[in-house]
Amino acid sequence: MLEIHYIPVGGAEKVKTYETANAFLAAQYLEVPELQDNSRVTKVLLDGEAVELQDKTVAGLFDYLNH
């Protein structure tokens, strides 16, 4: 399971979960992605383990999981 804690531009912190990392990647490939690329990521858990990102944005998470 992938759990993403993020702050959309001008908004309050939210949490979005996906069954798998691939489900998140597929959602971001849509013409209108579920999460904005520039939203700030505050915490990511992948199968219960914290993920440290260099680029703490949704785009940065996408790049991390896509490699």
Image (cartoon, rainbow, N blue to C red):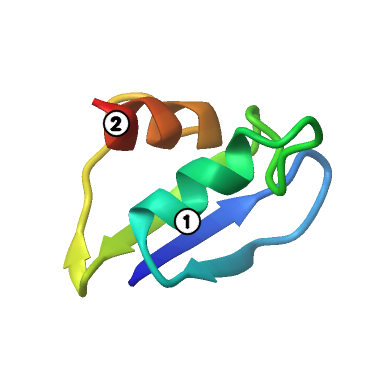
Q: Which secondary structure lies at badge 2?
A: helix
Along the viewing direction, whichever of 64 and 9 lies nearer the viewer = 64
Between 14 and 19, the one lying in front of the other is: 19
Q: Which mark is on residue 65? A: none
* Vertical arrangement, residue 22 with respect to residue 16, above or below: above
Residue at 21% in and 71% down = 47
Which residue: 22% across, 50% down? 51
Label 2: few (<14), some or many (≥20) within 10 Å? some
> Which residue type carries mark 2?
Tyr
Residue 10 position within the rendered picture, expressed as x and y whole percent measured from the top left: 83, 43
First in sequence: mark 1 or mark 2?
A: 1
Q: Position of residue 5 (x, y in %)?
A: 50, 61
* Residue 39 % position (x, y): 64, 38
Circles 1 and 2 in contact, beta carbons < 8 Å: no
Q: Nearer the viewer, residue 37 or 55?
A: 37
Question: Relative to residue 19, is residue 34 depicted above or below?
Answer: above
Crowdedness near tag 1: few (<14), some (14–19) or many (≥20) residues, C-alpha within 10 Å: few
Q: Amino acid at mark 1?
A: Ala
Quadrant location of the N terminus in the rendered image = bottom left
Q: Give the labeled residue for mark 2.
A: 64
| Position of residue 33 measured from the top left corner of the image (x, y, whole percent) | 72, 39
Residue at 21 percent across and 74 percent down: it is 48
Give the structural element (helix, strand or loop) at label 1.
helix
The structure residue drawn at horizontal position 60% and vertical position 38%, both measured from the top left corner, is 28
Q: How many marks?
A: 2
- The residue beneath circle 1 is 23
Q: Residue furthest left?
A: 49
Cα gap from disc 1 to disc 2, whole angstroms = 14 Å
In this rendering, position of residue 15 left or right of residue 18 = right
Q: Which corner quadrant of the image does residue 46 belong to? A: bottom left
